[in-house]
Image (cartoon, rainbow, N blue to C red):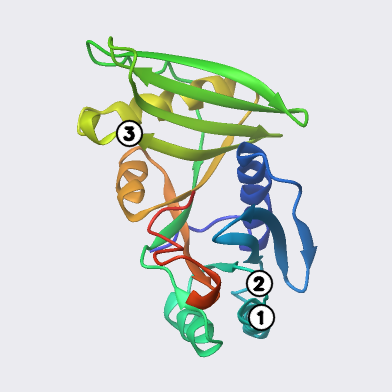
Amino acid sequence: MYAPTTPLPELIRRWQAGWGTARGLAAAVEARGGLHVVHGEPDRHTESIALHAEEDLDSVRSLAEATAAASVPTWCTVPTRHPEVVATILTEAGLVLGTGIETLMTAELESTAPLPAPDPYRATFAVRPTDGVPVIEATVRHPSRTIAARGLMAVHGSDAVAHSIETRPAHRRRGLASVVMSTLIAEAVRLGATTGLLVASSDGERLYSALGWSAVATVLVASTPPKHRRAGAPGAARP
């Protein structure tokens, strides 16, 4: 099910660094077997991302218990190749598992021309520096100037980390997400990226698998009990 790859903790650190940059977050703090990130959002003030679920389940248990005891809405995110075991640890700690299944994926990137947008759509991209890291934004627009699809990719050294790839409901099933990804990758490779990283929703995993990406871990997301959060968080896709 999972592709052989670089040790999982290293991939998690690399993914989080690019994802955090794309979201405009402050750098994560590594402590107690995890990466700790402040979001400052109503349903996710803080997030702890476990690094060692493969070799140290006690560290996952400690993170889960600390999350359950948090006084603010907190997420505990665990990339793992043993999701059933980890899910039990998270629920036994008193956390609420998210309803969606996410997947950490990677790909070796190659220099190819971006896919053309189908008529009548047009694809464009822009690059903006964020804390010295290039963040690419690709956009596909309808002639009405409506944004039909978009996505971000942070180029962190030789890694290109995709984030928030989305197609608006009225424009789905036209290949626009593939256009966005190919546009992002073409520019990321030009900027020096050789490896792609992302966390995909279940729908996204099907798309990225078809584009040649490989799953390296399941990502479980759990949160503090409902007293800290609005109903429905965390949801099916990683914001």
How far apart are the two marked residues, 3 and 2, measured between alpha carbons? 34 Å
Q: Is residue 117 above or below residue 36?
A: above
Mark in front: 3 vs 2: 3
Q: At which x and y percent is residue 72?
A: 65, 69
The residue under the point 56% across, 68% down is 78
Q: Please report the residue visible at 61 percent of the width from the left and 49 percent of the height from the top.
A: 15
In the rendered structure, the answer to whether residue 217 lies left or right of residue 66 reads: left
Q: Report which residue position mark 1 lands on.
A: 56
Mark 3: amino acid? Thr
Q: Looking at this view, is 170 or 53 the one in front? A: 170
Question: What is the x, y in percent for residue 235?
Answer: 41, 60
Tell me if residue 143 comes above or below residue 74 in the rendering: above
Q: Report which residue position mark 2 lands on.
A: 52
Q: Is residue 214 left or right of residue 67?
A: left
- The residue shown at (25%, 36%) is 169
Image quadrant holding the N terminus, namely bottom left
Q: Amino acid at mark 2?
A: His
Q: Secondary structure at mark 2?
A: loop
Label 2: few (<14), some or many (≥20) within 10 Å?
some
Q: Residue furthest bottom?
A: 92
Q: Are marks 3 and 2 in contact (CB under 8 Å)?
A: no
Left or right, 205 with respect to 74, comes to left
Vertical arrangement, residue 132 with respect to residue 104, above or below: above
**Toward which corner of the image does residue 177 lie, by quadrant?**
top left
- The image shows residue 225 at horizontal and vertical percentages of 51, 78
Q: CA distance from mark 1 to mark 2?
A: 5 Å
Residue at 35 percent across and 37 percent down: it is: 211
Label at residue 167: 3
Nearest to the observer: residue 148 or residue 112 = 148
